Amino acid sequence: MTHAPDFDAVIVGAGAAGLHCAGIAGQLGARVLLLDRAEKVAEKIRISGGGRCNFTNRDAAPANFLSDNPHFCRSALARYTPADFIALVQRHGIAWHEKHKGQLFCDRSAEDIIAMLLRECDAGGVTRRQPCAVRAVRHVDGGFELDTEGGPVRTRQLVVATGGLSIPKIGATDFGYRIAQQFGHRIVPTRPGLVPLTFDAALWAPFVPLAGVSLEVGIEAGAGKARGRFVEDLLFTHRGLSGPAVLQASNYWLPGAPLHIDLAQGTDLADALLQAKRSSRRQLGNEMAELLPRRLAEAWLASRPGWAAKPVAEMRDQDLRDLARQAQHWEIVPDGTEGYRKAEVTLGGVDTRELSSQTMESKLAPGLHFIGEVVDVTGWLGGYNFQWAWASAAACARALAERPAESAH
């Protein structure tokens, strides 16, 4: 005799992907239970975008995502677009604005997005239990059985939406990866993504006084098809480099490889210095300070004794060209990252070759689904990872609701 399941679907993880999936599936008629081990839902939404939640990017497309299986994300992203999520935000009367480069933020607070997702869950009759940790998962006839802090739960379908390893202080764990491995799934090796980069202390010593200096740069990292080039703001820190430029590049950077940085993005530095030589009586240090932040210009010239105080008119053309080339083709090798503690996302995760791109369902364990950051799909900085959460959640939710309920025997 088979017991009827308590729910059509249990979703583990009440973050962006889990909440969105629960709301849609519930409204499509599925009986959904949403579990989370934390007292507060969606802590990552709450702290994102400086507390205003960069909830999507108008321009989100497959090219903005990294994965060992790069075409996997196409289906979900095509079937739930930024426009779909914007429409949901507008239906709830949430005021928002575009900051730049397609990045959309709440006018008021990230709490508006969390409240919206909870209202959507309520509209779908979703049952929520928290804090309620899952201690074990078993495959049983007709689905899965979960041992939870609130007692055993049976379900026809199980959705893992537990996120990655980034920002452990808000509760990140490897639970999702352990469940995947329990059911035979391969995990693409994980590493911190969208994370500041650090440098050997001796190498970095000349740049420590630049902490706090920010400027727009061109930056490249990686090789071949896995090469990223961005034009964003770079920030010097006491330990290395941060800011949007470096966070973007970090997704493509591999240990031992250099970063390539243009410190005078959009300027032909050699031409500007040669023109100054012909028309200016000022010192080279003052001319460089017109083209780069003053503290950076001073640090850049510090390793060239006497140059800063030398009149630019007395400089050799070749020396000016070399100075410009070194600034516009700065090559420097990080020795590591600030780790998951400072990482916004986790690269790697559940191998998508073993999932359906249409439904996010496991090809190895029918009824088991993985959505959001736990999957090996990682977006750029700027709302792309939230869009993957919404899109993968929507693809999964439709599948949960489409599977007809099984009657008890």
Image (spheres, helix red, strand yellow):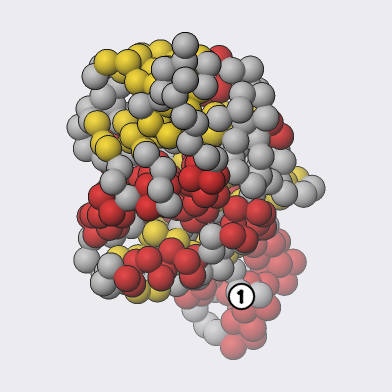
268 and 148: which is toward the camera: 148
Could you tell whether 371 is left or right of 74 in the image? left
252 vs 286, nearest the viewer:
252
What residue do we see at 54% from left, 46% from top?
402
Label 1: element kind = loop
Number of numbered discs visible in the structure rendering = 1
Q: Taking 310 as reference, is 119 left or right?
A: left
In this picture, residue 144 sits left or right of residue 314: left
| Amino acid, disc 1 | Thr
- The image position of residue 56, as x and y in percent, is 45, 61
Against 126, residue 381 (above or below) is below
Of residues 315 and 359, the one drawn nearer to the viewer in this rendering: 359
When asked about the image quadrant of residue 99, the answer is: bottom left
Residue under the image location 66 percent in, 24 percent down = 364
> x, y (%) of residue 127?
27, 37
Q: Is residue 317 left or right of residue 372?
A: right
Q: Would residue 134 be seen by someone viewing this image from the given angle?
A: no
The residue carrying mark 1 is 267
Q: Is residue 3 visible?
A: yes
Going 72% across and 71% down the picture, which residue do you hit?
317
